Image (spheres, rainbow, N blue to C red):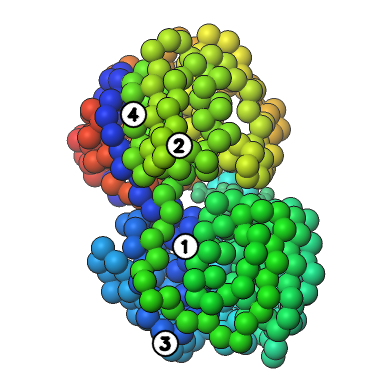
């Protein structure tokens, strides 16, 4: 297992190319199931989660060919199962449910269970799919779904779940008649999935808003041109915080400011200068970091996937910041590790009070989930001395070529095998 070694305290300056979005790539790969044929996807990030999704496609009988344009052949689906060994590695495998039901009339998907950031139930996915005519039975840790004919329905989600909205969307495109999803997730990745499905011949309006209307069609087919996956807003946001926390100046190329409105506003309030370009975002900081209060919320609110990174930044202010996490009940796993680096944070339920400290100091810390790991990298970049981050396989799930990209903007970062001095 690898670890990351960081010598901190260097202001990072330069340009970072942003990769394709993990959370758009995963549903898009599953959406290829609903349109038999050869799909071509460009800008697919090289990530462990994308590999797992391609393995899942392979398991159900849909081979893929890697390259700058990834090809996935969904002409034939031989099995309708997402087995435990894959779902265990990546919860997003639950996205197989909607497309398999739409394509095969059945699906057997291992239940994802809990994870480091919370319980993460899928009741809304199942209720939405039931409204479309599916029936489910739980047995042996699996959810077994069946449907003879998908029928359009009015679906209200109790909360705007991202993968829940995506699962329902991927089934509703092939349902007979009209489907309305209210209180849908409005994340840019849902909008991207809607646009991709439309390129396959679906009739979806409103993806990327709270109300999505779908007119079912009888069949879908791969589009003539490769689909170019949108840039990863969370990856971009993470590098912009790297500029902020090190007092540097980073331009994220191929980044969309419109997807990061809440994050950029917080960075400005924290004392950074933000430049929003057509296809780039630049963040720099010369003065002190100011305390800011943050509450995570569904899009366009402040994204939970940036909460840990901002906590690292707000650890280095001259005052107190409050961070309220409203999406996941257990997403403060990074706090204990930030404390090891010298941060001063109190947690009370879903509220963290970050008492700013003048500096952090390098230490050995443990990555617990993807975004928690990102916050430790950021803290390590700002801390004096050497930080060792263990269990960085979490980072490989969501940040493409992280060490290389950081080195290109001047960071002293390297990977080494755990157990070796490095
Ligand atoms: N929820 C339910 N029932 C459901 C579905 C969700 O109670 O049926 C709850 C969850 O427990 C949570 C809230 O609703 O409290 C929102 O969860 P959501 O379903 O939106 O999360 P998700 O779809 O499982 C996606 C991203 C996450 C991101 C969240 C929130 C993907 C593959 N994953 O998860 O990304 O944090 O939306 O924006 O799109 C990450 O990239 O690090 C990551 C965790």
What residue would you read off at disc 1? 26
Mark-to-mark CA distance, 3 and 4: 44 Å
Q: Which mark is residue 250?
A: 4
* Secondary structure beneath label 1: helix
* Residue at 30%, 20% in the rendered image: 11
Instruction: Say which label, 2 or 3, has the lower sequence index.
Output: 3
Judging depth in this view, the residue of 173 and 72 nearest the camera is: 173
Mark-to-mark CA distance, 1 and 4: 28 Å
Q: Nearer the viewer, mark 1 or mark 3?
A: 3
* Residue at 48%, 23% in the rendered image: 313
Instruction: Say which label, 3 or 4, has the lower sequence index.
Output: 3
Mark 2 C-beta closer than 8 Å to ligand 1: no
Q: Position of residue 22 (x, y in %)?
A: 44, 54
Mark-to-mark CA distance, 2 and 3: 37 Å
* Secondary structure beneath label 3: loop
What residue would you read off at disc 3? 75
Number of residue marks: 4
What residue would you read off at disc 2? 237
Mark 1 C-beta closer than 8 Å to ligand 1: yes
Pointer 3 and pointer 4: residues touching (CB < 8 Å)?
Answer: no
């Amino acid at each position: 297992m690898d670890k990351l070694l960081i010598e901190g305290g260097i202001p990072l300056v330069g340009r970072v190319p942003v990769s394709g979005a993990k959370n758009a790539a995963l549903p898009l790969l599953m959406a290829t199931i609903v349109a038999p044929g050869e799909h071509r996807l460009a800008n697919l990030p090289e990530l462990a989660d994308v590999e797992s999704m391609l393995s899942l496609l392979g398991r159900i009988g849909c081979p893929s060919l890697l390259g700058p344009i990834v090809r996935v052949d969904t002409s034939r689906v031989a099995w309708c199962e997402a087995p435990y060994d894959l779902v265990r590695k990546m919860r997003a495998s639950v996205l197989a449910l909607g497309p398999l039901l739409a394509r095969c009339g059945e699906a057997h998907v291992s239940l994802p269970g809990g994870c480091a950031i919370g319980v993460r139930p899928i009741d809304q996915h199942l209720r939405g799919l039931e409204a479309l005519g599916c029936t489910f039975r739980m047995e042996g840790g699996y959810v077994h779904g069946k449907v003879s004919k998908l029928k359009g329905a009015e679906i209200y989600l109790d909360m705007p779940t991202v993968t829940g909205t995506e699962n329902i969307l991927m089934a509703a495109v092939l349902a007979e008649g009209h489907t309305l999803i209210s209180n849908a997730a409005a994340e840019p990745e849902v909008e991207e999935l809607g646009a991709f499905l439309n390129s396959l011949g679906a009739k979806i309006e409103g993806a990327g808003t709270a109300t999505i209307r779908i007119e079912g069609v009888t069949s879908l087919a791969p589009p003539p041109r490769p689909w170019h996956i949108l840039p990863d807003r969370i990856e971009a946001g993470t590098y912009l915080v790297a500029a902020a926390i090190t007092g540097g100046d980073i331009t994220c190329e191929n980044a969309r400011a419109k997807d990061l409105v809440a994050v950029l506003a917080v960075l400005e309030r924290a004392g950074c200068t933000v430049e929003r370009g057509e296809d780039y975002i630049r963040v720099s900081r010369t003065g002190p970091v100011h305390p800011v209060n943050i509450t995570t919320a569904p899009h366009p609110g402040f994204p939970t996937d940036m909460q840990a990174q901002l906590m690292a930044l707000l650890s280095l202010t001259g005052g107190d910041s409050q961070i309220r996490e409203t999406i996941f009940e257990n997403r403060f796993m990074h706090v204990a590790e930030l404390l090891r680096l010298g941060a001063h944070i109190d947690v009370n339920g879903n509220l963290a009070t970050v008492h700013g400290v003048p500096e952090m100091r390098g230490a050995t810390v443990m990555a617990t989930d993807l975004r928690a790991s990102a916050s430790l990298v950021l803290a390590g970049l700002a801390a004096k001395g050497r930080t060792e981050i263990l269990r960085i396989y979490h980072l490989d799930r969501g940040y493409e070529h992280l060490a290389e990209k950081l080195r290109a903007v001047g960071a002293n970062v390297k990977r080494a095998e755990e157990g070796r001095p490095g």
